[in-house]
Image (tube, grey):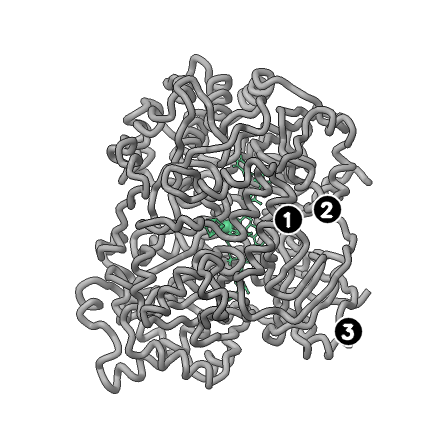
Amino acid sequence: MSDLPKDKALTPEKFENLKTKTPPTNSAGLGGLKAATSHAIKYIKSSNILKITQNINQKGGFDCPGCAWPDPDDDRSSLGEYCENGLKAMAEEMQNKLIARDFFAQHSVDELASLSDFEIGKSGRLAEPMYLPEGAIHYQPISWSEAFQKVGAHLNALDHPDEAVFYTSGRTTNEAAFLYQLFVREFGTANLPDCSNMCHEASGSALSETLGIGKGSVTLDDLYKAELVMVIGQNPATNHPRMLSALEKTKKNGGKIIAINPLPEAGLMKFTDPQSPVKMLTGGTKLSDVFVPVTINGDVAFFKALLLKLLEKEELTGDVFDKAFIEEYTNGLKDFISDLKIYNFDECLKASGVSRETFDEVFDLILNKNKIIICWAMGLTQHENAVDNIRELVNLLLLKGSIGKEGAGTCPVRGHSNVQGDRTVGIWESAPQAFLDKIENKYGFKPSTKHGYSVIEAIKAMYEKEAKVFFGLGGNFISAVPDTVYSAQALANCNLTVHVSTKLNRSHLVTGKEALILPCLGRAEKDYQKTGVQTQSVENSMGVVSSTKGVLEPCSESLMSEVAVVCGIANETLKERSKIDWLSYQDDYNLVRDDIAEVVNGFEDYNNKLKKSSGFYLPNGARVRDFKTKTGKANFTVNKLPDWKLQEDELVMMTIRSHDQFNTTIYGLDDRYRGVFNERRIIFMNKEDMKLRSFKEHDVVNLKSNYNGVEREANSFKVIGYEIPKNCCATYFPETNVLVPIDSFAHTAKTPASKSVRITVEKV
Ligand SMILES: Nc1nc2c(c(=O)[nH]1)N[C@H]1C(S)=C(S)[C@@H](COP(=O)(O)OP(=O)(O)OC[C@H]3O[C@@H](n4cnc5c(=O)[nH]c(N)nc54)[C@H](O)[C@@H]3O)O[C@H]1N2
Ligand SMILES: Nc1nc2c(c(=O)[nH]1)N[C@H]1C(S)=C(S)[C@@H](COP(=O)(O)OP(=O)(O)OC[C@H]3O[C@@H](n4cnc5c(=O)[nH]c(N)nc54)[C@H](O)[C@@H]3O)O[C@H]1N2
Ligand code: SF4
Ligand SMILES: [Mo]
């Protein structure tokens, strides 16, 4: 292997043994349970399995690290409050293999980088701190105190604190996240990029501007009571499995469901609740009343078509819009309507790729409904016009008065189990001044008021050598970010790269001149400190904060909690110049929560409130029609149609998750619900597009993207003919992140446009 950073960053171009079947239309049921249980048995110590399944998502137990879907407020099922993927997440975290000094002495960094992501992940849990000196090819053991000294020395040697980048992934608990951002701000920078920058940032931007809060407005109970739920750009059967149980309840109560997605994702079509024995026998519920196979990035066009027809009807009958709501609570209707009238219905519908028949079905379902909830995820947020996507769906909700009342509102479905909480407690490169003022008042230092780097800006700064130290609290930066070749060089340009991690990943192998791996406790493990086993807390996708407490013994004695790592580094870096007694927090996390209660809105009396086992709701203005926007009202917005065009031989590619992965962690090589087995290097194509190019099933192809004259390539993928709109294709993340241009991101939010990459496909 060459010495180039890109060669360690790219996933190896080797094939496994692809098998395909006709995709099932039903999801979960026995298949799901069987798959999860056999997976768990393979990797988890058998004595731990029962403890995990009895405590996961139970009151007083630990929060599933799988995703951010909320737990029911009321009674939790004794059959278990988890899904196939929750169990798979646990199997990954609680693997019974450990990797320590012998492993690293045996395998060089280059050798590990030549493995697939699946193989890297299955090496085991990180068991002790490791250090890669400059020029070395093997990691070697290092003590915790020496590791902290190295980080402190590098940070203190910088010309300016802004030369350091502090990344966070969304598993970090509120306690660790709050202390981390506090340390970073006291150190003197606001460079706090996080995984949210690549995820729901566009939702945050659009919702803050239009509704005054960057989070969703609904609760689980609202979902049950909605007349209509639209699920847009989201694949819940894989990524938020228990959402399907909630949607089933919506249907049972008479609600309708519309799925808008280029792919007919299995669970959206039909679902069998694996925790309902009756359903398993009777064959499940048909979930979607209408499936809308929109073209990739055709959502604004589809919404404009809908809005135009609703307006037409309103002008005829006067009973489509909620005029009382619009009058009292909103701003900007006139400009919105006059802009809308510029567009032509037929052209919008054509651009959306949706047939007139399907459109009419959707229109009929929406016309007379007023309790509408719109759920969405990455299919809307990872485009250059992602913010417009979300502002346009808010326009629809506002016209219908479908916000701030029972059974109606916005539901951006978040990804990582605490990504929403991390932002709430201060992981934000552009935090509001009011928050910074509170930090200053409480701690007596002045936080930097300059906006810090988001993910894209951090990569560019490292590439340009303006940032020299990269610190990651969780995550797998190199595999998660766009433009892998460019980003690998960016990391390699650093003096030091540090990762606080549970598992080995590719980011440990694409390093700066020196590198550190700091192994930490996972969610399910007991966090022993001086005052006993500590409780922590997280916020789910619907703004409920609840406690999480590990139940298993730590897999190694040399692990530290994230809180302890942050305290140790802060203490070592800031020494006497700090105004904070860092080490006191790690002895007793109640002290951290006392501080959060003083600094962060909605957390008053935090320690007490957390005693309520189902948690507590944070205040949410949009939920009660108190819109804290610049105008003091909910804002209509004016949004353009996307203006990019495909060249003659181009396709638009979305990079999506398979059923057997959690972001960059590859649980297995199957994508059962799409009928793909034992391979990840595949491209889903429309059969007509294949015919045009004379491709046959399983032909091997190379992919190229050309953006502003720069060519990027990803080689060796097998073609699979699939039910996907013409001119669209899909591949898995992270194998094709190398094709996502660093300069292609959402306006305002800067989310990489990893769902609309223009590519050409050539047979090898
Ligand atoms: N098991 C598991 N659970 C997870 C994760 C995981 O990797 N594995 N990841 C977690 C994280 S961090 C996140 S953010 C979420 C992600 O959850 P999702 O957003 O569901 O994940 P993706 O696979 O990116 O799927 C995007 C969906 O959008 C559709 N889509 C793509 N482009 C468009 C478009 O232009 N318009 C429309 N309407 N649809 C489009 C795709 O067909 C796909 O169904 O899941 C979380 N939960
Ligand atoms: N092309 C493309 N790129 C994408 C996306 C896409 O859809 N397409 N999705 C984007 C999205 S939505 C997201 S959220 C990002 C995800 O980006 P990241 O959050 O950076 O990536 P993950 O794969 O979730 O991180 C996995 C690593 O986290 C570590 N880890 C796991 N649990 C813990 C823990 O409890 N503590 C600590 N300290 N470490 C832990 C493990 O070492 C593991 O290897 O990727 C983004 N990138
Ligand atoms: S839906 Fe998400 S949080 Fe709930 S058990 Fe499944 S993976 Fe875990
Ligand atoms: Mo995400």
Any atom of ligand 2 within 8 Å of the CB at mark 1? Answer: no
Question: Which residue matches tag 3?
Answer: 696
**Left or right: 213 with respect to 272?**
left
Q: Which residue is drawn at 71% across and 23% down?
A: 140
Is residue 85 visible from the viewing direction of this image? yes
**Left or right: 758 with respect to 430?**
right
- Residue type pointed to by label 3: Lys
Cα–Cα gap, marks 2 and 1: 9 Å
Q: In this view, does 198 lie above or below 268?
A: above
Q: Which residue is drawn at 43% across and 41% down?
A: 63
* Sequence-earlier tag: 2 or 3: 2
Where in the figure is residue 337, as x and y percent of width and height? 31, 74
Where in the figure is residue 14, as x and y percent of width and height? 78, 53
Question: Which residue matches tag 2?
Answer: 116
Question: Which residue matches tag 1?
Answer: 666
Q: How crowded is mark 2: few (under 14 residues within 10 Å), some or many (20 or more)?
A: some
Residue 244 appears in which quarter of the rendering?
bottom left
**Left or right: 609 with respect to 514?**
left
Residue 224 appears in which quarter of the rendering?
bottom left
Cα–Cα gap, marks 2 and 3: 26 Å
Given residues 576 and 462, the one toward you in this image is 576
Report if the CB atoms under discs 2 and 1 are less than 8 Å apart: yes
Q: Is residue 92 above or below residue 15?
A: above
Instruction: Residue at the far top: name it.
Output: 576
Q: Residue at x 75, y 61 (%)?
A: 18
Any atom of ligand 1 within 8 Å of the CB at mark 3? Answer: no
- Residue type pointed to by label 2: Ser
Q: Residue at x 38, y 77 (%)?
A: 306
